[in-house]
């Protein structure tokens, strides 16, 4: 049984703990919050746990072997580093880190300490994501793709009121690309591989990060366009274009509607996808399989693939925001 500790008590932490417990592979062992009452309220909703209001005490909990980190983006690196030095596996909510240097240091440190690092990018582990990957033809039969994830954030209301919430702050590595854009980049890199070059055209907001933007990922034979956004809503589908037809998706995460249209409009085929009630169950189970089977070569190979994918996604996001002159505090460390 995996003894799970949690940093962060917001809704996404609750959803992950629910998913982890549903797999029957985890128990909630500990919760960290700066306020004891907040930690207790979170833990008691899952039957109780140990609580800590300072990280040194938290990481010192001996029977806790794995830490899920869902704090503001800019805090992930130092918290993950401390957890790994305490010999804990780390599951870091996407986006895991702000820069390629942070990503490389954590990967190297996890290998040295013989623990696991996972980026909690749930869409890559979902059944629908894998089904789409299996449907893709050879690269020379792909004409391109258009991927969209744009959803208005209620926290933008705070920006309009003159505030700077973490999700829209360069001090906390925020913005549309770093939030919803991660799903799009995981889709592009997971389905098509690393692009040759990338460009991002951002619409900056008053805090200095991107509220929405348009990106181009250039491959040898085709381009992929991405559109992340948090200051408006898009109802567009995502599409992948082939020589012989088009694959239409309801999105790039929690995929539940996949339809193939052939070029001559003679065939329309719906691909069966049954999403989980909790979209984090599949990633939680995948991480558990690696943690509980450390000597299994099959899971070992998958783990190395996930780590390399996380590294590549981080690099692409970094290159995209640099092309748009989006600067975080983490860039100057």
Image (cartoon, grey):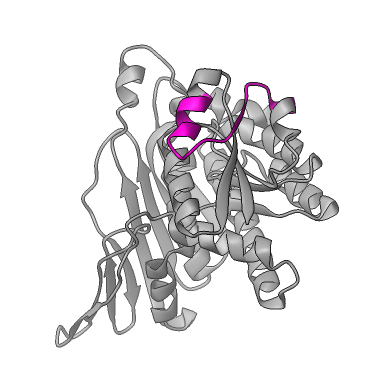
* Image: magenta residue range: 39-56
Q: Nearer the viewer, residue 5 or 280?
A: 5
Residue 309 in the figure: left or right of residue 63: left
Q: Residue at x 39, y 75 (%)?
A: 131
In the picture as drawn, the residue positioned furthest to the front comes out as: 47
Q: Is residue 172 above or below residue 111?
A: above
Q: Where residue 45 sits: x, y (%)?
A: 42, 35
Rendered-image quadrant of the C terminus:
top right
Rendered-image quadrant of the N terminus:
bottom right
Instruction: Report if residue 217 is visible in the image.
Output: no
Tell me, yes or no, whether the highlighted magenta stretch contains residue 41.
yes
Tell me, yes or no, whether the highlighted magenta stretch contains residue 32.
no
Q: Where residue 28 sits: x, y (%)?
A: 56, 43
Q: Residue at x 33, y 73 (%)?
A: 241
In the picture as drawn, the residue positioned furthest to the left comes out as: 266
Q: Nearer the viewer, residue 149 or 8?
A: 8
């Amino acid at each position: 049984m995996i003894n799970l500790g949690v940093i962060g008590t917001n809704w996404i932490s609750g959803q992950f703990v629910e998913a982890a417990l549903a797999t029957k592979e985890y128990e909630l062992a500990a919760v960290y919050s700066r306020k004891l009452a907040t930690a207790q309220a979170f833990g008691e909703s899952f039957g109780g746990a140990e609580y800590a209001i300072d990280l040194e005490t938290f990481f010192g909990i001996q029977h806790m072997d794995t830490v899920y980190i869902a704090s503001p983006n800019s805090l992930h690196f130092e918290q993950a580093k401390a957890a790994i030095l305490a010999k804990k596996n780390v599951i870091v909510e996407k986006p895991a880190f702000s820069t390629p240097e942070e990503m490389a240091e954590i990967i190297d440190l996890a290998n040295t300490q013989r623990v696991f690092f996972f980026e909690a990018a749930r869409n890559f582990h979902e059944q629908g994501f894998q089904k789409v990957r299996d449907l893709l033809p050879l690269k020379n039969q792909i004409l391109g793709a258009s991927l969209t994830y744009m959803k208005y954030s209620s926290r933008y209301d705070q920006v309009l009121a003159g505030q700077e919430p973490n999700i829209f702050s360069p001090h906390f590595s925020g913005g549309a690309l770093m939030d919803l854009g991660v799903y799009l980049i995981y889709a592009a890199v997971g389905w098509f591989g690393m692009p040759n070059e990338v460009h991002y055209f951002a619409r900056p907001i008053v805090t200095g990060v991107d509220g929405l933007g348009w990106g181009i990922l250039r491959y040898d034979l085709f381009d992929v366009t991405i559109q992340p956004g948090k200051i408006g809503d898009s109802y567009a589908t995502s599409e992948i274009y082939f020589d012989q037809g088009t694959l239409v998706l309801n999105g790039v995460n929690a995929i539940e509607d996949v339809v193939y249209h052939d070029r001559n409009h003679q065939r329309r085929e719906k691909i069966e996808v049954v999403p989980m009630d909790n979209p984090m169950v599949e990633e939680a189970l995948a991480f558990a399989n690696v943690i509980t089977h450390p000597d299994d070569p099959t899971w070992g190979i998958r783990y190395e693939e996930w780590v390399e994918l996380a590294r590549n996604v981080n690099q692409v996001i970094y290159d995209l925001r640099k092309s748009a002159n989006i600067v975080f505090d983490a860039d100057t460390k």
